[in-house]
Amino acid sequence: MKDKLNIVIVGGGSTWCPGILKSLTKHQDIFPLNRVIMFDTDAERQAVIGEFGKILFREEAPEVEFDYTTDKDVAYEDVDFVLCQIRTGGYDMRSKDEKIPLHMGLIGQETVGAGGMAYGIRSMTDMIEIVKDVRAHSPKAWIINYTNPAALVAYGLQKAFPKEDHILNICDQPVNLLRSYGRLLGRDSSEFEPVYFGLNHFGWFTHLYDKDGVDLVPTIKKFVKENGFKPVDAEQRDQSWLDTYAMVADMLQDFPDYLPNTYLQYYLYPKYKLAHLDPDYTRSDEVINGREKRVFAECRRVAEVGTAKDSSVVQNDAHGDMIVEVSSAIYRNTRQTFIVMVKNDGIVKDFPDDAMVEVAASVGVNGPQPYAVGEIGTFYHGLMVNQYSYERLAIEAYFEHSYEKALQALTLNRLVNDAKDARAILDKLIEANKDYWPELS
Ligand SMILES: NC(=O)c1ccc[n+]([C@@H]2O[C@H](COP(=O)([O-])OP(=O)(O)OC[C@H]3O[C@@H](n4cnc5c(N)ncnc54)[C@H](O)[C@@H]3O)[C@@H](O)[C@H]2O)c1
Ligand SMILES: O=P(O)(O)OC[C@H]1O[C@H](O[C@H]2[C@H](O)[C@@H](O)[C@@H](O)O[C@@H]2CO)[C@H](O)[C@@H](O)[C@@H]1O
Ligand SMILES: [Mn+2]
């Protein structure tokens, strides 16, 4: 590997991009940089973050070449790591993913339920194009992907590029949960060794060992049952995220085996969530009126005053830190443990080999080497088989342009379930996504 790396951030106009830029400047000791380029299809949106980036790099890492572009040939040439997080259709389409199902009395969300399927099918065409474009310029670059719904994207990319061994799909929710456990225990979460299994946004911590090999899960469970649960950055969170974390106490009350991923709230308590969600003001509205406004206003302010020294644009470092630390572990072959998505291939017993499971893995120069999970209980196995089957059918619907498979996928989805509801919502999603989905027949 080179002494200094060339990086491209795909989705340079993302609200999470400033956090990645900041993390890149701060981790140069473990991830040395020669060049950082941002790439986005929306020039105007990206320019705001790009101008912030210019100032940040001038102040924090002046030796690094920094720029932003909408030209693929410039972005992808001679690149070592591609850090990817795009949103096909933007927040307008996210809003539809949430509101169309809710108006029918069903849960829809960025990565969950019928909305999650709509977004997954939208993401696939762009993600496949990105991989092909990268490979045309940089055959060996590592592609580290955050793009959601990561479960569907990971499964779809594996089907589209079965020989690829340099794509790694990641999610920052497990690491945020680890940091949140660290906060409640008053301990440094970077010392924790997690044991985790599931699908993306659909998993559980079974153990969490400290440096002395003591499992902290029983203490965390007891604490959460008695005191509730808050995210590590509770003071900066919108109400919907505080409500989400609070549901972990309910999940532990009903299913005390393991510590659940927060997204399981939708699958386990759909009636409760439906009763507490407003179909006319959803998470996308919160983001549009909150994080998006704040990030873009702050980047514009930095550009105006000409310094990023006192900038508060990044409120939670976990997202930026994870993608940079995973990349560094590959570059330096550190074999640190991260929770990432990998092909099952026997990790979870009696589970399909081609499923993209989310588990703890040691990450080094050859990518993730997952730790075995083995047998899981009937309840968890049943939930996962159902979810995997939905994911697989949704992706097959995309590749085969199959209405029938899309209908099967939605009917299997725990948050739809009824075949007549599935057909009605599928027809609405087809109409709403006509500029993005392949024609299903
Ligand atoms: N895996 C995770 O845990 C995790 C965590 C946070 C965010 N995300 C994902 O990251 C993505 C970005 O989220 P956001 O809220 O910042 O969205 P955003 O809309 O603010 O940013 C997405 C950017 O991607 C750009 N884009 C769209 N299509 C593109 C393409 N084909 N090529 C290049 N750029 C393209 C858009 O123009 C936009 O600037 C989403 O998919 C989100 O779900 C994932
Ligand atoms: O609703 P959003 O856009 O705020 O977030 C959706 C994402 O939620 C998870 O990300 C967490 C993330 O784990 C954490 O780093 C932190 O900064 O907050 C995010 C939520 O605000 C989830 O893992 C992602 O997949 C979602 O896109
Ligand atoms: Mn995630």
Image (tube, grey):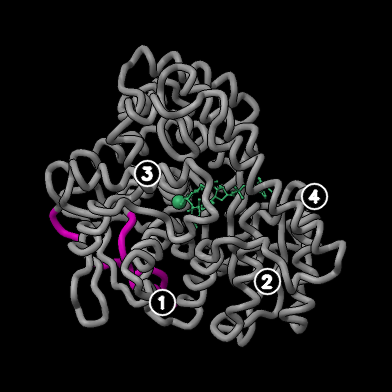
- Element at label 3: loop
Circle 1: is it few (<14), some (14-19), or many (20+) Cα within 10 Å? Answer: many
Q: Is residue 337 left or right of residue 157?
A: left
Give the labeled residue for mark 4: 43
Q: Residue at x 49, y 73 (%)?
A: 325
Q: In this rendering, which labeled residue sits more in front, label 3 or label 4?
A: 3
Q: Amino acid at mark 2?
A: Asp
Q: Amino acid at mark 1?
A: Gly
First in sequence, mark 1 or 4: give its number. 4
Q: Please say if 402 is above or below 383.
A: above
Q: Which residues are magenta?
A: 358-375
Residue 78 - label: 2
Q: Residue at x 47, y 23 (%)?
A: 101
The reply to whether dot 1 and dot 4 touch (C-beta < 8 Å) is: no
Given residues 184 and 78, the one toward you in this image is 184
First in sequence, mark 2 or 4: give its number. 4
State the CA–CA distance, disc 3 to disc 2. 38 Å
First in sequence, mark 1 or 2: give its number. 2
First in sequence, mark 3 or 4: give its number. 4
Does the numbered disc 3 mark a residue whose Cβ is under 8 Å from ligand 2?
yes
Q: Residue at x 55, y 83 (%)?
A: 1
The reply to whether dot 2 and dot 4 touch (C-beta < 8 Å) is: no
- Element at label 4: helix
Q: Please say if 103 is above or below 268.
A: above
Q: In this rendering, which labeled residue sits more in front, label 3 or label 1?
A: 3
Circle 3: is it few (<14), some (14-19), or many (20+) Cα within 10 Å? Answer: many
